[in-house]
């Protein structure tokens, strides 16, 4: 892009389903705090995330098992647990999902940039190969220092996602 040329702002519509309400600070972060941190970071790519709905879920065992069946690999959670948010092992979040069903799960007491990090995966970003704490795609979102940064190649890849409009 030439100097002075303006990129069109792209949008992602986000629907949040709450299985366990987020823990308030200092142990957790509110959805509003996580959304603000994500939009601050994504603004460098001219991407805005719009929170469209927030629904608290009260799942039956069958519904929980169906939800669990959507996740594969390290995101899979035990159906005997009361909530998905509390059984991610050492993970703060995960965005492994079946093809065509973009979703992520985050722990109810996750770090400030975990939601942005997992949405970054949904937009096609991989973990950064370095452990630099200023990078949004640091493999350990709990170690990300504010403000989180995206590099040019991540911005380009993110803006090419079919999830943005």
Image (cartoon, rainbow, N blue to C red):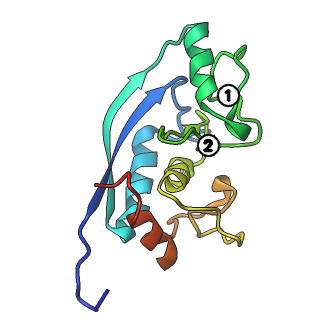
Few, some or many residues within 10 Å of mark 1 (<14, 14–19, 20+): some
Determine whether, in the image, residue 141 is placed left or right of residue 12.
Answer: right
Q: Secondary structure at mark 1?
A: loop
- Does residue 106 appear in the picture of this structure? yes
Can you give x and y, in whole percent of width and height, for residue 154 in the image?
Answer: 50, 70
**Corner quadrant of residue 83:** top right
Q: Judge by depth and name the residue closer to the eye, 26 or 128.
A: 128
Q: Is residue 12 above or below residue 24?
A: below
- Does residue 151 appear in the picture of this structure? no
Determine whether, in the image, residue 86 is placed left or right of residue 19.
Answer: right
Q: Residue at x 44, y 64 (%)?
A: 158
Q: Which mark is residue 86?
A: 1
User: In the rendered image, which quarter contains the C terminus?
Assistant: bottom left
User: In the rendered image, which quarter contains the N terminus?
Assistant: bottom left
**Corner quadrant of residue 39:** bottom left
Q: Which mark is residue 96?
A: 2
Q: Secondary structure at mark 2?
A: loop
Q: Judge by depth and name the residue closer to the eye, 113 or 153.
A: 153
Q: Is residue 73 above or below residue 19?
A: below
Can you give x and y, in whole percent of width and height, for residue 66 in the image?
Answer: 58, 18
The CA span between labels 2 and 1 is 17 Å
Q: Nearer the viewer, mark 2 or mark 1?
A: 2
Report the number of discs.
Answer: 2
Q: Judge by depth and name the residue closer to the eye, 11 or 110.
A: 11
Determine whether, in the image, residue 164 is placed left or right of residue 118.
Answer: left
Q: Which mark is residue 152?
A: none
Q: Residue at x 52, y 41 (%)?
A: 29
């Amino acid at each position: 892009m030439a100097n002075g040329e303006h990129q069109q702002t792209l949008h992602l519509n986000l629907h949040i389903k709450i299985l366990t309400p987020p823990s308030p600070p200092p142990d957790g972060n509110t959805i509003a705090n996580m959304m603000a941190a994500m939009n601050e970071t994504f603004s460098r790519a001219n991407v805005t995330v719009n929170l469209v709905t927030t629904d608290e879920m009260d799942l039956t065992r069958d519904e929980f098992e169906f939800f669990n069946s959507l996740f594969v690999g390290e995101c899979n959670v035990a159906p005997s647990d009361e909530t998905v948010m509390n059984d991610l092992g050492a993970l703060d979040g995960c965005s492994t999902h079946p093809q065509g069903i973009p979703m992520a799960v985050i722990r109810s007491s996750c770090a400030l940039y975990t939601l942005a990090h997992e949405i970054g995966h949904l937009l096609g970003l991989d973990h950064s190969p370095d452990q630099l704490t200023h990078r949004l795609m640091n493999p350990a979102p709990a170690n990300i220092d504010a403000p989180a940064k995206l590099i040019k190649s991540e911005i380009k890849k993110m803006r090419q996602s079919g999830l943005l409009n």
